[in-house]
Image: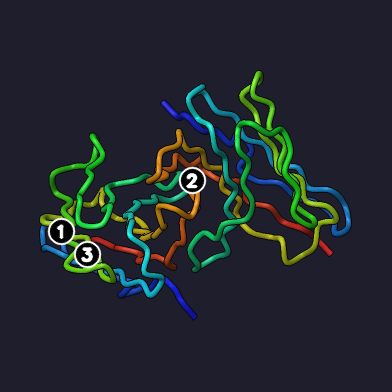
Amino acid sequence: DAMVIQNPRYQVTQFGKPVTLSCSQTLNHNVMYWYQQKSSQAPKLLFHYYDKDFNNEADTPDNFQSRRPNTSFCFLDIRSPGLGDAAMYLCATSRENQGLGTQHFGDGTRLSIL
Amino acid sequence: DQQVKQNSPSLSVQEGRISILNCDYTNSMFDYFLWYKKYPAEGPTFLISISSIKDKNEDGRFTVFLNKSAKHLSLHIVPSQPGDSAVYFCAASDGGSQGNLIFGKGTKLSVKP
């Protein structure tokens, strides 16, 4: 089945130690998104790629970076994780001509900071 | 300030009855609305959507109603089933081909047998 896969499902890192979360897709969608969701909060868009074009949300901290080496893969890099970065990180994809807003989500990576 | 609000964090309904989940929004530029359903340990999955040119969209047991003047939408599930127990997120888009979404905090629905 075509899908969005996030690895790992659970990630533990130390305060200040860089961490990378990965997302891959077999849907061949041209848009990929990273969301942060804290407990009992709404998923919050961090940034998205439209093909190779990177779009950063205005309030996304500089500590968060992203890479998309090809259509299938997208990475979220947190350069110096703080305790406030502990959250569920969701990757999603969509296709431009599929219609407005319909996104396909992975199952998320839950990040814990020690 | 939240642009999409789901004011009820939880809702409990008896199996077979109607579930009504509510969502309010503040941005009049939103022109497309979606509901996503999320089970524990899984990502959200798309459920149903509605364009601002409509006031109702129906898909099986799920119906979404949009009241633009009140900036309010609701999701009706009838009849409710225990498998519908999940967190439901309301989301809105101001259009454009990239479809960026603004989500609400979600409402946890419990359907009791």
Say few, some or many: other residues with alpha carbon within 10 Å of mark 1 (under 14 / 14 to 19 / 20 or more).
Answer: some
Identify the amino acid type marked 2: Leu
Residue farthest toward the front in the current orientation of the protein: A97
Report helix, strand or loop for mark 2: loop
The mark nearer the N terminus, 2 or 1, is 1
Using the rendered view, name the quadrant where residue B81 is placed.
bottom right
A3 over B96 or under it: above or below: below
Residue that carries the numbered disc 1 in the rendered image: A15
Q: Quadrant of the C terminus of chain B?
A: bottom right
Whole-number angstrom distance, CA of label 3 to CA of label 2: 24 Å
The mark nearer the N terminus, 3 or 2, is 3
Residue that carries the numbered disc 3 in the rendered image: A75
Report helix, strand or loop for mark 3: strand
On what subunit does the disc labeled 2 rest? A
- Which residue lies at the image location 34% right of the left edge and 46% below the top edge? A45
On what subunit does the disc labeled 1 rest? A
